[in-house]
Image (cartoon, rainbow, N blue to C red):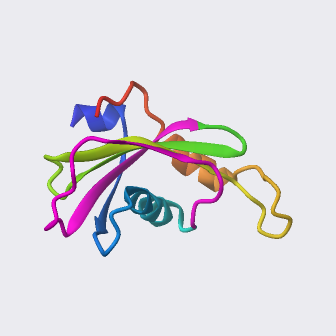
């Protein structure tokens, strides 16, 4: 699809367990992409539709809205497994933290390279 070329995305299917906290599903998608749990930052969610009680799996689309030396801001859309019902959209910002000193550190070149490929070129209209 042309839109996927202009706005590349990482797609993750998140199983719904007992939680209805949608930010946890975003964090699980980030873990699947990065291999580590997100630290710091914040999450802003705009709920679009109520989650159906029989929902077993959520589709989480991630892209990068902004990437600097110490932070990465992901845009996301959470929808039904088939992508037809949007439940929420928003942004999740994470901070690169040195595990030993607990101070901010610059992203690795591998992280920057992988995430630059997910930078959106046009506004994502979700």
Residue lying farthest top? 122
Displayed quadrant of residue 47: top left
Q: Nearer the viewer, residue 60 or 1?
A: 60
Q: Nearer the viewer, residue 111 or 125?
A: 125
Residue 33, position in %: x, y? 47, 60
Residue 77, position in %: x, y? 33, 45
Q: Is residue 21 above or below residue 50?
A: below
Residue at x 38%, y 61% (from the top left corner)? 21
Residue at x 60%, y 44% (from the top left corner)? 72
Residue at x 16%, y 59% (from the top left corner)? 52
Q: Report whether 69 appears left or right of 100.
A: left
Does residue 62 belong to the magenta stretch? yes
Please identify the quadrant where the N terminus is shown: top left
Residue lying farthest bottom? 18
Q: Report whether 33 appears left or right of 103.
A: left
Number of numbered markers: 0
Residue 116, position in %: x, y? 54, 41
Q: Report whether 37 appears left or right of 59.
A: right
Residue span colored magenta: 37-66
Q: Is residue 106 above or below residue 35?
A: above
Q: Nearer the viewer, residue 112 or 77?
A: 77
Residue at x 65%, y 54% (from the top left corner)? 40
Does residue 19 belong to the magenta stretch? no
């Amino acid at each position: 699809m042309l839109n996927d070329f202009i706005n590349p995305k990482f797609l993750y299917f998140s199983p719904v367990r007992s939680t209805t906290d949608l930010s946890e599903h975003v964090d699980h998608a980030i873990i699947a992409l990065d291999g580590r749990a997100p630290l710091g930052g914040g999450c802003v969610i705009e709920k679009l539709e109520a989650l159906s009680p029989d929902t077993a799996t959520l589709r989480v689309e991630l892209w990068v809205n902004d990437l600097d030396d110490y932070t990465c801001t992901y845009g996301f859309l959470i929808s039904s497994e088939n992508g037809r019902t949007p439940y929420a959209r928003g942004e999740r910002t994470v901070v690169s933290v040195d595990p030993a000193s607990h101070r901010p550190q610059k992203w690795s070149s591998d992280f920057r390279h992988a995430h630059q490929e997910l930078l959106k070129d046009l506004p994502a209209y979700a």
